[in-house]
Amino acid sequence: MDTHNYESHDTEHGRVVYLPNATTDADAEVIDAEIVDDTPTDTTTGERAGERAAERSPGTELEDVRARTVFGHRRLISVERRDRMADGAVVLTERATPVVKTGSKALVRNTVHVAQGVIVVAKRWRDAHGSTRYERQMRAAEAAGDQEALRYWQEAAVAEKQARHSRVMDWIRSPIELAKAFAIGVAGVCGFLLAVGIVLAVADGDAGMILAPIGLVIDTVRWLWWFGAAYGFLLFNAALAALVIYLWHEGKHHASWTPAWLTGSSDDNTGESVLVTPGGIVAALQHLGIAPLNRAFKDGWTPRFHLSPTREGQGAFKGFRAIFDLPMGVTPNMISDKGDVLAANLSRNPVEVWPSDYGKEQGGRPGCVNLYVADAGVMDKPTPEYPLLHTGTADVFAGVPMGITQRGDQVAFPLVGSNVVFGGQPGQGKSNAGRVMMLGAALDPLAELRVHVFALNGDFDVYAPRLSRYEKGASSEHVEAAVAHLHELYEEVTRREGRLAEIGAKKLTRPIADKHPDMRPLIVVFSECHELFGHAEHGKEAAELAINVVKRGRKTGVVTGYDTQSSRTDAIPSQLVENVGLNGCFSVKTWRSNDGFLGDGSFAAGIRATELRFNIDRGTMVVTGATDELFEICRTYFIDVDDDAGWDQAADVITRAMHALAPGTPVEGDRPQRQIEQDRDLLEDLDAVLGDEPVPAADVPALLARHAPGWAPYRRLTGKALRQQLHADYGIKVPSTGNRWPVDPLTVRDVLARQATADLDTDT
């Protein structure tokens, strides 16, 4: 029995309507309870509700409602199960939403491609059968001020209009001509069939064969009609499907616009799924804000792709390359100037998008852009380990490994036949690049290495056993020693030119270097060279010598390398930068610094290290001369150093290089450093260089410099200065004698003898 006390509720509360209870167990567990309105929704339920309300008076408290199992009544669900069902629904929604979203986008995108294909085909037909393209070219020629091109397109437009008029007149006359042709064709075919029938009738002796060929044709027509009626629907659908596929292909690959929300998910930051398509490039160009380009697009111009976006690269380092033309009045330089906007339009960082002038590349087309778009995030991926860190040797003729490109291809510097300049802001990787280059050169058993560091850092300390000459410091003495070394290098270039002539070779090759120990490749690095070229006393002389060594030493195997943080003329000569074969520029602030390290006109050609991010792209440089490309973005290998622990990753490599040396390759101690002379006696040197005949004063300084190449005053001496010094210091007056100012060796030796006698008298 139900023992509940049903009391009336306050009128402000609704009635409690009790569901039928299938159990009388008072101790059953309470599952749920609810308050419902007793207002009937229909007659039947209303009467039942009224009867139950009359039988049960609602109490003043919420009554317990126990689990019901009566058939036909609502069964209450437990809280735990209801929570599980809700969680399952949420998970299902989360999993299904991306699938539905992606599928919906794919469906709409491919539908849009078909519509775009219709537009593309319609434009082609319009251009092929109308004068639109001629008018477009005339407007472009007029905007560019090209009168010759304008005249050409005007004449072409007139010719096209005349041809179109002729075609229209042909269509007007064509129905009559077609009817005549059809009648003649039918008569001809019937005559032919009758002739064949007569031949058959004569051959078989059966007159009924005369009409047999015509009957065969009628049967064939009847069969074709039946086939078309039976399978025409399928053939029509197949043709329609082929047409849709064709339009889809044309729209996908040749459309000039694609809704941005259909190109991919904005939540995908991997970069690999953000495809670069012709339509995407065109859309990016349309929003660069270049007025002549905007007018060209408005007039109906679309770029022609000489290379559609093509996937390049390997491993984790990939991207897209495309080559396309530009309209009249727009240059590749104008596109390069908008590189940051172009990158944003392609969903990339500026350092990941590199437009350049394709016309300046070997075999390139003038007026075209070579565009490389790296996958998003490529620049943030770690550079692989130095490939020769644990094993292997290098070849300075073929190239030493320096780093990788954005495509993951290895960049190698062929040192022999080239010279090298590294530049950029401080702390961006110049010194490491020099270390990487020299580490590769150290692994060539034939290469001789020398290093000048115009600072007191220890970048090359562990390289010392492999170096035949190693000096560091920013003192004037070091600068003077480096200038003397440049004189030695210039003399070495002269000697090697003579040796090559003796051997009968035009340039140094590896077999020659292997056979002749005195012709081994010589690699000399001047690190922090702004201290050398900016020296007040010796800088100008050092610059002239360095330029001459670079110009003449290329074929002789004498290679020089320079790194500096300043592009000023007094930090690194512009002629030196122009004459080296390999230029590497790390992050710089201005186009002047960019061209100061990469050569004049580099910035205008799209070769821009200004796009590299300071500190973020540390170790990345813009390189020219290393490959057939106009330039490369090279991420240099890193040779690790721990200054606190005194550990250098290059130490083990140098040890391995020392064991791989070829006999006769000079290393530490084989070429003692030339000592800087503190003083020389001019008269003694003149006695040594002068013969028995007087020599013009203008020719004497060269003789003295050759006699004492390490003595800087002789390198700066002139004929006039020599005459003045002889008169002021020794009382020797050089006569003009036909304006030749000959220096008489007898006079010099006479004064020298008197000095010696005076010294003896002083001693006594």
Image (cartoon, rainbow, N blue to C red):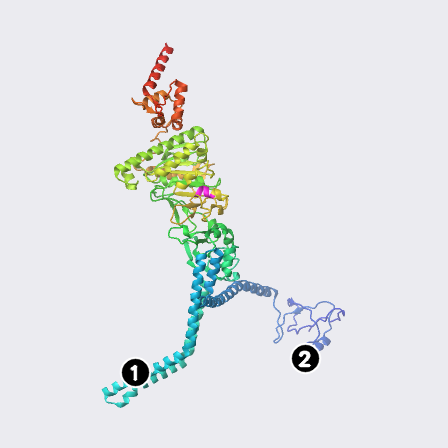
Residue 504 or residue 19, whichever sits in front: 504
Q: Which residues are magenta?
A: 594-598
- Would you say residue 78 sits in the magenta stretch? no
Q: From the image, which quarter does the C terminus lie in? A: top left
Q: Is residue 451 at least partly visible in the picture? A: no
- Badge 2 is on which residue? 44
Residue 511 or residue 51, whichever sits in front: 511
Q: Residues within 10 Å of mark 2 (few under 14, many from 20)?
A: few
Residues at marks 2 and 1 touching, judged by CB atoms closer than 8 Å: no
Q: Is residue 138 left or right of residue 37?
A: left
Where does the image place residue 21, in percent across and percent down from the top left? 65, 73
Q: Quadrant of residue 170?
A: bottom left
N-terminal of the pair, mark 2 or mark 1, is 2
Q: Among all residues in the image, which is located at the extreme right? A: 11
- Disc 2 element: helix
The amino acid beneath tag 1 is: Phe
- Would you say residue 597 sits in the magenta stretch? yes
- Badge 1 is on which residue? 192
Where does the image place residue 300, in percent across and percent down from the top left? 49, 62
579 up-or-down from 710: above or below: below
Q: Among all residues in the image, which is located at the extreme bottom? A: 207
Q: Main secondary structure of the magenta part?
A: helix
The amino acid beneath tag 2 is: Thr
Q: Quadrant of residue 369?
A: bottom left
Disc count in the image?
Answer: 2
- Foreground mark, 2 or 1? 1
- Disc 1 element: helix
Q: Is residue 43 at least partly visible in the picture? A: yes
523 up-or-down from 678: above or below: below
677 up-or-down from 163: above or below: above
